[in-house]
Structure formats: structure tokens, C-alpha cells
Image (tube, rainbow, N blue to C red):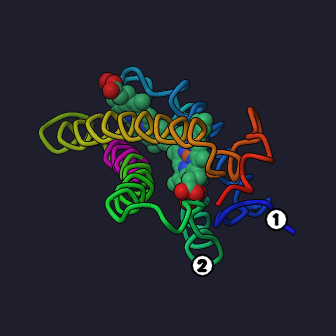
Amino acid sequence: MSLHKNNSHYSKTAKLFHWGFVILFIYGVAKQVDNINQLEDTTFFRFEIIFAIIFLLLLIIRFIYMKLTQKTSLPKDTPKAQKIAAKIVHNGMYLFLGITVISGLLIGLLFWLNIKDGALIEIIIDIHEIVINILYWFIGVHILAASFHRLKNDGVWSSMVPFLKENKTNKIKK
Ligand code: HEM
Ligand code: HEM
């Protein structure tokens, strides 16, 4: 029995993917390559590539799982423009996460092929950096939107976030 309005409940797997990725992403950014010369260190290079491949595979699995089995917690009466905005931000985060990792792997491939400077690798590093900066903005908007739903008490926040849960009695209102 659920007290939620029209909200779906995300499965435990969906929550594990969501929060697991938040940790993986913060880790990935924290240990970012500060300087391309760091890639000369074979152990560092190998670790970076293995991390990126695992990240990409998990991202694909998460995307397929979420699209096949879960749906947004937005209430049914949400204005169309807001539903579209949520879709753009969610899909955008998948897209930019994907491009960040793939461009990182491409940098690794070029480096491994001994193409360590020149226009090609510079363009791909630029893409890598521009895309991750767009991603930061999307994540910022996403967290703002989640906080907005928390203030609205419409159940969206609690469907995914394990802390500062909404008061259950607020969700019976129709
Ligand atoms: C690296 C940071 C984050 C990324 C990349 C991210 C990504 C996503 C994505 C793609 C979804 C759509 C469901 C899915 O496919 O899993 C989602 C849902 C959600 N996220 Fe995040 N998220 C991040 C951080 C956060 C944080 C910090 C919060 C809250 C403080 C949050 C709250 C939510 C909520 C409430 C939903 C459900 C939205 C709905 O059902 O329409 N997320 N997130
Ligand atoms: C999940 C995977 C990855 C994440 C989250 C990530 C994150 C980042 C971040 C945050 C930056 C700094 C961007 C900025 O300054 O605005 C960066 C730069 C860079 N990354 Fe990645 N990266 C990933 C994968 C890789 C891989 C696999 C490689 C290559 C083996 C790579 C090579 C580089 C290089 C060369 C730079 C530029 C360093 C410089 O400023 O000279 N990245 N990455």
C-alpha cells in the first residue's frame, strides 16, 4: 500500500545505481588527470583506463535497466513543459557522462598510439573538458530541481533520496 500521490517507487537497484554513480563520479572527478604527462606513468594510465571502461559499462547497464523497468516519480498532473525539462536534464546527464568517458578513453587510445600532442588530441581534450563542465551545470540544475520538489512535498524527492524524507501525511493530499 502506498501513500504516494502518483509517484512510482524507484527499486532498490535503481537507487543503488543512482547513488553508486554519485560516488563513482565524485571519485572520478577527484582523481582527474591534472596534466597529460601523468599518463606516462603506466600504473596510473592502466588504472585510469580500467576505471573508465568499468564506468562506461555500468553506465550502459544502468541506462538500459532504468529505461526498461523504471519511470519518473513526477506526479501525473505535472505541466508538460516541466516533464520535458526533466527528461532533457536526465537524458542530458547520461549523454554527457557517456561523452566524458568516451572522450577520456579516446585520449587514452591516442596516447597509447604515441599521438601525445598535436591538434587531434588537443581537440579531444577540449571536448572532454567542455562536456564535463556542461555536465556540472546539468547536475546543478538537477539538484536544484530535486530541492524544489522537496519544498513542494510531492513525493519526488523521497522516491530517490534516503535523507530529509518528506512527512508521509503530506503525500495523501490529492
Ligand atoms: C552526480 C550526480 C547526479 C547524477 C548524475 C544524477 C542523475 C540522475 C538521473 C539520470 C536520474 C533519472 C533516473 C535515473 O535514470 O536514474 C535521477 C533521478 C533523481 N535524482 Fe539524481 N543525480 C545526481 C545527484 C542527485 C542528488 C545529489 C540528488 C538529491 C539531493 C538527486 C535527486 C534525484 C531525484 C529526487 C530523482 C528522481 C527524479 C524523478 O523521478 O523524476 N540526484 N538522477
Ligand atoms: C569517468 C571517467 C573520467 C572522468 C570523470 C574524468 C574527469 C576529468 C576532469 C574533471 C578533468 C578536468 C576538466 C577541466 O579542467 O575542466 C579531466 C581532464 C582530463 N582528463 Fe579526464 N576523466 C575521465 C576519464 C579520462 C581518461 C580515461 C583519460 C585518459 C586516459 C582522461 C584524460 C584526461 C586529460 C588528458 C585531461 C586534461 C588534463 C589537462 O588539463 O592537461 N580522462 N578529466
Furthest residue toward left: 119
Whether pointer 2 and pointer 1 mark residues with C-beta atoms closer than 8 Å, the reply is: no
* Residue corresponding to mark 1: 2
x and y percent of residue 1 in the render? 87, 69
Looking at the image, residue 51 lies above or below residue 10: above
At 39% from the left edge and 44% from the top edge, which residue is drawn? Answer: 104
Look at the image and say whether residue 108 sits in the magenta stretch: yes
Look at the image and say whether residue 20 sits in the magenta stretch: no
Going by the numbered disc 1, the residue's amino acid type is Ser
Closer to us: 47 or 99: 99
When asked about the image quadrant of residue 119, the answer is: top left
x and y percent of residue 130 in the render? 26, 36
Crowdedness near tag 1: few (<14), some (14–19) or many (≥20) residues, C-alpha within 10 Å: few
Label 2: element kind: helix
C-alpha gap between disc 2 and disc 1: 22 Å
User: In the shown orientation, is residue 31 left or right of residue 169?
Assistant: left
* Residue corresponding to mark 2: 68
Looking at the image, residue 148 lies above or below residue 174: above
Label 1: element kind: loop
x and y percent of residue 6 in the render? 64, 67
Closer to us: 36 or 84: 84
Looking at the image, residue 153 lies above or below residue 82: above
User: In the shown orientation, is residue 173 left or right of residue 168?
Assistant: left
Name the magenta segment's main secondary structure: helix
Q: Is residue 48 visible?
A: no
Crowdedness near tag 2: few (<14), some (14–19) or many (≥20) residues, C-alpha within 10 Å: few
The magenta segment is 101-112
Closer to us: 154 or 140: 154
At 21% from the left edge and 34% from the top edge, which residue is drawn? Answer: 117
